[in-house]
Image (tube, rainbow, N blue to C red):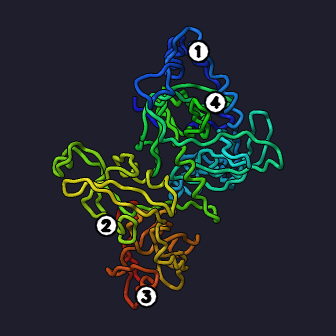
Amino acid sequence: MAAFFYRTMVKSGEVFVPAMRQNMSLYRLIFTSLLFLSGPILSAESAQKRVPTSPAQIKLSFAPLVKKTAPAVVNIFTQKTVQARRGVPSLFDDPFFRQFFNDGFGFPRDRPKARQQNSLGSGVIVDPSGMIVTNQHVIQGANEIQVILADRREFVARVLVSDPKTDLAVLKITPEGQNLPYIQIQDSDDLEVGDLVLAIGNPFGVGQTVTSGIVSALARTKIGDSSLNSYIQTDAAINPGNSGGALVSVNGYLVGVNTAIYSKSGGSHGIGFAVPSNMVRAVIRGVSPGGGLVWPWFGATGQSVSQDIANSLSMERPTGVLITAVHKAGAAAKVGITVGDVVLAVNGHEVNDNTGLRHRIATLPIGDSAVVRLWRGGKTRAVRLPLMAAPDKPRKNETKMDGSQPLSGAIVGNMSPALAERTGVDPFVTGVFIFNIIRGSPANRLGFRPGDYLRLVNNRPVPSVKDLIREMEKPADQWRIAVLRNGRTRELIINR
């Protein structure tokens, strides 16, 4: 049976508490304790990691660590309004079938009725002023967000930023002079595979729960839909409702935000994923006054190095990202990175795919610089990359198309690398995009959609809004408009 990635959130009204798992066996407790307790091993660098030397040390508890960190992990309840249509079976309410069965075969067609949908997740207070980090999917679409602390205090939260690229959201509550518990953020690059961690959250809506495990892998990039994250993998039990909860190191610091699980049933099978704390710190740092996020932009993209590519480039092993495209306005071009170069590492951290490369750049502050190690011409070399935001040129020039023409009612504008980064469009694509369409307008009736990239009008390129308007106003018997949508080009022919 195929396995799936689950976002670990629970909808109230749909929550049931299955039979609880059996308690951790004595052998696992001893094993995890061995990783945590005393005795220097191997080298001076690992002097802090000890094994037990007596039965008394095996009986040591995580209770002091839990008392220190658990109060800062909160429950997040959200409420959003959804539209539900009654009286028509769902088959006939589908937009496709409504084209043919407008009367629903006699079923009454009530207007959509609003209903409230509740959901549950977790969050972590990371600042005594009331700043909370959680997952974006926990609060997505919420009309109201309520935060409940472990000591049962309740607050209404507002959203500072909600970012689908990292699946992180930053909330703010107002303590009004009250003291708030919080967890300090640790450098997640200090983690190693085998380190002991605790996962704290509210699984299945049963209340705050603590589970323990180890870091089982680092830099997992092919998880879910995120285009920036390089996840921490852990075997600490993470279940629905744990989303946004804390992954805590044994010294009591936040090292990750629990996000997803790999499971066949929706429950924990020992493979959970957390957003690294360095990305959490970057999201907090990157919040702009307007509520958006501004990331450092590498300005180049590539592919993982396979064994065949490594052989062709005289590399000892397949590692790094082979650059396949460089934007002329990006930081990579400014330091001479070209197509054919292989990026091996950023600030000493290896990268092996494009997501990992973007993650490493995104966790660094704009205005700083990073050392990028390259493979070029059979040798390694290093360049110092300036960390800069994607350029906001050309200007958007948002324009409403009107008049007697097929794009009337479409809101169009020029795409820039900065706008592409914000909207999830390929930043190497430039030209005119449709940002919105007025309902009932000619553009709406002809099937144009927000996000369409207008490539050609009457077989002529339209690189800017000005060019588009000029082509649409030219006298002709018909319009031929080529549109790029979901990676496919479609051509629409409209007679005047």
> Whole-Å distance between the Cαs marked 3 and 2?
38 Å
Which residue carries the number 4 mark? 204
> Whole-Å distance between the Cαs marked 3 and 1?
72 Å
> Whole-Å distance between the Cαs marked 2 and 4?
52 Å
Spot occupied by residue 258 in the image (x, y as percentages of width and height): 56, 38
Rendered-image quadrant of the N terminus: top left
Quadrant of the rendered image containing residue 253: top right
Q: Is residue 459 left or right of residue 143?
A: left
Q: Is residue 419 left or right of residue 136?
A: left
Q: Residue at x 63, y 41 (%)?
A: 184
Which residue carries the number 2 mark? 336
Task: Mark 2 or mark 4: name the one nearer the start of the chain.
Answer: 4
Badge 4: residue crowd in 10 Å (few <14, some 14–19, many ≥20): many
Which residue carries the number 1 mark? 23
Q: Secondary structure under badge 4? A: helix
> Whole-Å distance between the Cαs marked 2 and 1?
57 Å
